[in-house]
């Protein structure tokens, strides 16, 4: 619930109610990002977080700028295709590292942060067959 004091701590209990979506590259085949949203397991406020799936390709620098990141990935994928190299497939299991980014009020949150209750967790996502 909103109102709980901010506390930076891992959440290790089960996580329920989250849903995930994959973001695809322009080829509509290569998944480049997973976006998971739902109630934060700690404060129950709505939260969402995303994780890039293609970060191990050479020369890829992660940035907070979503459009710049997608553009960089598209460029890299185009290079791979030109060279006839395989593009990364969708993993069967994604370990998404998430942190609460709710819009709720949590006292004691330090002034540099604008959201979240401080909880963070790893969300294991089985990628269903029809995603691949
Ligand atoms: Zn939270
Ligand atoms: Zn919250």
Image (cartoon, rainbow, N blue to C red):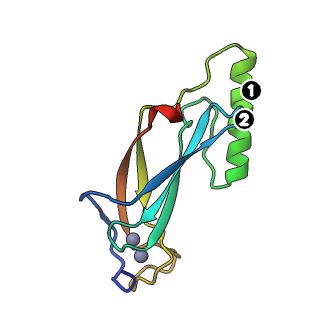
Looking at the image, the residue that sits furthest to the left is 13
Residue in the picture at 42% in, 32% down: 92
* Residue drawn where x is 72% and y is 48% of the image: 68
Q: Residues within 10 Å of mark 1 (few under 14, many from 20)?
A: some
Report the side of 50 relative to 123 (left or right). right
Say which of 96 and 79 sits in front.
96
x and y percent of residue 5 in the render? 34, 82
* Quadrant position of the N terminus in the picture: bottom left
- Comparing 29 with 118, the one in front is 29
In x, y percent, where is residue 63? 63, 50
The reply to whether the residue tagged 1 has its Cβ within 8 angstroms of ligand 1 is: no
Q: Are marks 2 and 1 in contact (CB under 8 Å)?
A: yes
| Above/below status of 127 relative to 17 | above
Give the quadrant of ligand 2.
bottom left
Left or right: 116 as drawn, with respect to 124: right
Which residue ends up furthest to the top in the rendered image? 84
The image shows residue 55 at horizontal and vertical percentages of: 55, 37
Secondary-structure class at tag 2:
helix
**Few, some or many C-alpha atoms within 10 Å of disc 2 (few <14, some 14-19, many ≥20)?**
some
- In front of the other: 106 or 48: 48
- Left/right placement of residue 126 relative to residue 62 reads left
Q: Give percent across and percent down for residue 104.
A: 46, 80
Indicate which disc residue 45 carries. none
Q: Which residue is mark 1?
A: 78
Residue at coordinates 38% horizontally, 84% vertically from top-left? 108
Specify the farthest residue to the front: 130
Q: Tell me: residue 112, above or below residue 64.
A: below
Under tag 1, what secondary structure?
A: helix
- Dot 2 corresponds to which residue? 74
């Amino acid at each position: 619930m909103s109102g709980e004091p901010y506390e930076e701590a891992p959440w290790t209990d089960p996580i329920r109610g989250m849903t995930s979506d994959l973001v695809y590259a322009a080829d509509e085949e290569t998944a480049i990002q997973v976006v998971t949203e739902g109630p934060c397991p700690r404060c129950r406020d709505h939260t969402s977080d995303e994780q890039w799936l293609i970060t191990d390709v050479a020369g890829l620098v992660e940035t907070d700028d979503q459009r710049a990141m997608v553009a960089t990935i598209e460029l890299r994928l185009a290079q791979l295709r030109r060279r006839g190299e395989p593009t990364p497939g969708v993993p069967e299991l994604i370990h998404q590292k998430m942190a609460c980014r709710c819009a709720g009020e949590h006292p004691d949150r330090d002034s540099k942060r604008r959201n979240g209750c401080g909880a963070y967790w790893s969300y294991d996502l089985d990628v269903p067959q029809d995603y691949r």
